[in-house]
Each structure stands twice: as structure tokens, then as C-alpha cells.
Image (tube, rainbow, N blue to C red):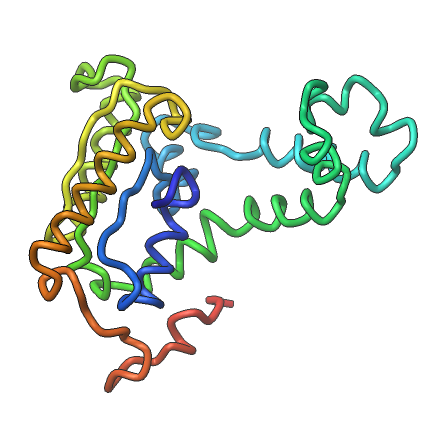
Amino acid sequence: VGHSAGGIYAQLFAGRRRKDVVGLVLVDPSIIYQDKRMATIFGAGAGSVAGIQARVQRCLTATLAGGAAVRDPVFNECVAANASAETRREGLQPSLWRAQLSEIDTLFNQTSDQRVRLGGLIRDVPAIVLTASRTGQPAAQGTPERVWEGVHSALADEFSRGSQRLVKSGHLMMNERPDAVARAVSELFDAYRAAPSRCSAPDMAGAAGFDEAAMWAAPW
């Protein structure tokens, strides 16, 4: 199961550990090269992660400074004032924000490149794409919501046993509609139990002609 950016990571995991994956549930997933694709459709700046990147950079700067910087109410954008003690301890670690910056920097370029290099290696993995929708029904033509539904439909079509479902929910579907996520997971498990050989495949690593080093190598 992969939510948002985790949808791309789940697909990469499936490519590397095919024997351990009997299905994918992609919960309102990000798409490869999302920032560039949205900018092409809606114009410069659409789909940009610059705002998120700037916030994470501010959090990193504050945790490195420590002291008054992390006691300032402004730091609440990093860790909520009512967060648990454990969450606050984690939020005070610069390593957390460095990791997030690294993810943001690579998600829609190097990480997207890695997904492209998978090619059709995970095409036969059963997959369900859950798209967050304000109504649970197809949006009007020409709206940003309809575009998002369309890119998710195209993602589902990349799998020979892929399907897309609109779920009345916000982006944090696992919090707002855990029933929808659990239902999709159960459906894939039931399909595996009914016909395990149909849902299983060997790992590609070690297969003739498969160059794992090239698969995961950075393009630069």
C-alpha cells in the first residue's frame, strides 16, 4: 500500500521484490514527473513543490539552530503545538528534515526515472488505484479534478489487472476513509488466495538479461 509519494515507492518495491508482492493499492498516489506534467497542462508553477520545499528548509534551519528557534510559535508549522512528546522529539531532529528535503529533491526526477526504467516488469501485478474525490463521482470535464482522475486512470491502465476507483475523500484517505483502503487490500488478498499462481511472479533480479545495477543507477 502506498499513499501519495509512497505510491511511486510501492511500485519500485514491487519491481525489486516481485515475489513478495501480490498486489498494489495506490492511495491517491503521486505520479511520475508530476510537477512537469501539471505545469504542461495548467501552466508554470502548477504542481510545484517549491512551497513544501521552502517549509521543510525552514524546519531544518530551525532544528539546526535549536534553542529559541524551536520554541518560537513559528516552529508549529513543523511540529504542531499539540503533538505528542514522541512526535516532537522526532521533529527536533535535523535528520528528519534532511531526509524530507532529499525526497522532495528527487521524487519527480531521479525517482521518477527509476520508475520509468521498470518498464513492464510490474505490469502483471494486480493494482487498485484509489483517487480522492470530493463527490465520489467523475468530475466535470476540463476541471483540475478531472485531470487528476485522468492521470490516475492512465496509471491503472499500465497494469494488465489494474483498476481505478473514485473515493469520496480528501487526500489523506487512509485517515478519512480507511474502509475504502482496507476493502481494496482485502480484495487483492482474496484474489491471491483464490488463485495464488495468477498473482505471483519470480523476482526479476538474476533473470537473464536483467541488469539490476542499470535499473537503479541514477541517470547522471
> Vertical placement of 210 versus 55: above or below?
below
Identify the residue at image location x=27%, y=75%. 204
- Residue 213 image offset from top left, x and y in percent: 42, 78
**Residue at the image point whose x is 14% and y is 40% from the top:** 163
Residue at far right of view: 67
Image location of residue 216, percent across then percent down: 43, 69
Position above or below: 48 against 209: above
The residue lying at 48 percent from left, 48 percent from top is: 107
- Asked if residue 51 is positioned above or below residue 104 in the image, the reply reads above
Q: How many marks?
A: 0
Is residue 80 depicted above or below 85 in this figure? above
In the picture, residue 139 is in which quadrant? top left
Whether residue 42 sits left or right of residue 44 in the image: it is: left
Q: Position of residue 31 (x, y in %)?
A: 34, 42
In the picture as drawn, the residue positioned furthest to the bottom comes out as 208
Q: Residue at x 10, y 66 (%)?
A: 197
Q: Tell me if 43 is positioned left or right of 20 in this view.
A: right
- Of residues 143 and 57, the one drawn nearer to the viewer in this rendering: 57
Which of the 4 image quarters holds residue 175? top left
> In the picture, which quadrant includes the N terminus?
top left
- Residue 119: x %, y % from top left: 25, 63
